[in-house]
Amino acid sequence: MNLDLVNVRLPMRDEEHLYQLSVRDGIWTRIHRQEAGAVLPDSISMEAWSPGNAEDMAVIDLEGKILLPGFVDSHMHLDKSFSLTSVENISGTLEEAVRNYSQASPAFTKEEIKSRIVRSALQALSFGTTHIRTHLDFNLRASREVALRTVEAALEAKAMLAPFMTLQLFPMVPYNLDSLDIGVIEEALRMGVDGIGGAPHLSLTAQEDIDRIFGLAKKFDLPIDLHCDETDDPQMRTVEHIALRTKAEGYAGRVTVDHLCALASMTDADAHGIIERMTEAGLKAVSLPAVNLYLQGRRDRFPVRRGVTRLQEIWQAGIPIAVASDNIHDPFHPFGRGDLLQIALIGSYAAHMGRPADLRTLLRMMTDVPATVLGLTEYGIEPGNQANFVILDGGSPEELFTLLPERRWVFSQGGWRRSPSSKAQWHDKELSAFWKNASETVSFRKQELARGSVVSDG
Ligand SMILES: [Zn+2]
């Protein structure tokens, strides 16, 4: 598709000027700074435009609205999303969530898991996310079949959504690996996944597990992305061993550590030493502010720790650290809507990042920084790159974070996907069908809804 946009605001590039942008066949071809008084081509306002009318010809006037590259959610659990109807978490702790989900997961069918992945991925796309890295449950303790079922469902969902958005799949290698069948893990890694995940801090043999994960990663030439020290215990420091192995194996730039809650519980001196070792090892990082505010500090009496890692200090050390969604409406987190702007706002509260410069940093933490985490090439608004972008109904980062505009226009993989000016939810028949099918499988509070419909039928 060909597109010309005028009066575009690009806050991550330059806030002094407006821009004129061109897309040809889904690729950025022109990024042109508009000078004051420049004569612009005839155009139709974004508000009056709808993708149905002569979309290949239109010059669209954004009237100063912000355009950002497609958001990149570097840490989700799409397979678990919307499972709260079948898996509860009364204590609100990570431990209960892990235990209950693992007990419930053998009963989930492949179709159900696939629907949850599709539904939550599309929900994220509707807010402007065009790339997602999702971790996958891998319940080898239940059985080989249960473990591989989620991987199969995710591979099918990834292929289905490939014309519209990109998913990266990272199965979570189970911990205390000794008693488990490594052969099944290798089978999963051969199925076409994108990397290796895990949560070794939950293991009794964390160091051995980390060593084995590195062994597998090297054998299959895959990147590593680990849940890391997601606990209030300041003594939990698996990140140190991960940093050590990353250096020893020459894996700098290919290892991501997520959560890092323990850093929020320890002294400055201890934390700074660890952050220094993370920098030396070339680790990348992801903070999950909403979920950690929810799950951490559950055993504290006041004052209660809030669990969110040292976002500012890690960033200032030069480590690429992204903010990401983690879980949506499941036992790990009952809320979330797959909107990275909302997550960045929660990050700003949790990490005291509200100054003008902080808001601009947060915009990067949901776009080009996670793009680095995912290893994306051709990302960002530059000629030659894929034109994946979202237009938001706001004129400054301050306005975005204050109003979280609902009105967004999403363009990905060569076409418009969503816009508030369209009556249909999705611009594409195929996407509408995916959404409808997936939404029928996942719902909120099924029982109440069923009763309600009986009453309204009279
Ligand atoms: Zn996670």
Image (cartoon, rainbow, N blue to C red):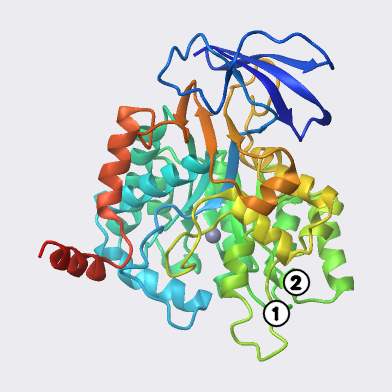
- Amino acid at dot 2: Ala
Q: Quadrant of ligand 1?
A: bottom right
At horizontal 81% and vertical 64% (from top left) the residue drawn is 274
Residue wearing tag 1: 305
Q: Would you place residue 439 above or below residue 270 in this image? A: above
Residue 282 appearing in the image: no
Q: Position of residue 104 (x, y in %)?
A: 31, 69
Total label count? Answer: 2
Query: How far is the residue under mark 2 from the one under mark 1?
Result: 8 Å
Q: Would you place residue 139 above or below residue 248 in this image? A: below
At horizontal 71% and vertical 21% (from top left) the residue drawn is 382
Q: Position of residue 86 (x, y in %)?
A: 30, 69
Residue wearing tag 2: 264
Q: Is residue 369 left or right of residue 169?
A: right
- Amino acid at dot 1: Arg
Pick the front one: 75 or 279: 75
Task: Examine the image and state in which quarter residue 237 appears.
Answer: bottom right
Q: Secondary structure at mark 2?
A: helix
Q: Are marks 2 and 1 in contact (CB under 8 Å)?
A: yes
> Farthest right residue?
269
Q: Is residue 211 left or right of residue 239?
A: left
Q: Is residue 324 left or right of residue 39?
A: left
For residue 149, the mark is none
Between discs 2 and 1, the one toward the N terminus: 2
Q: Would you place residue 104 above or below residue 366 in this image? A: below
Few, some or many residues within 10 Å of mark 1 (<14, 14–19, 20+): some
Q: Secondary structure at mark 1?
A: loop
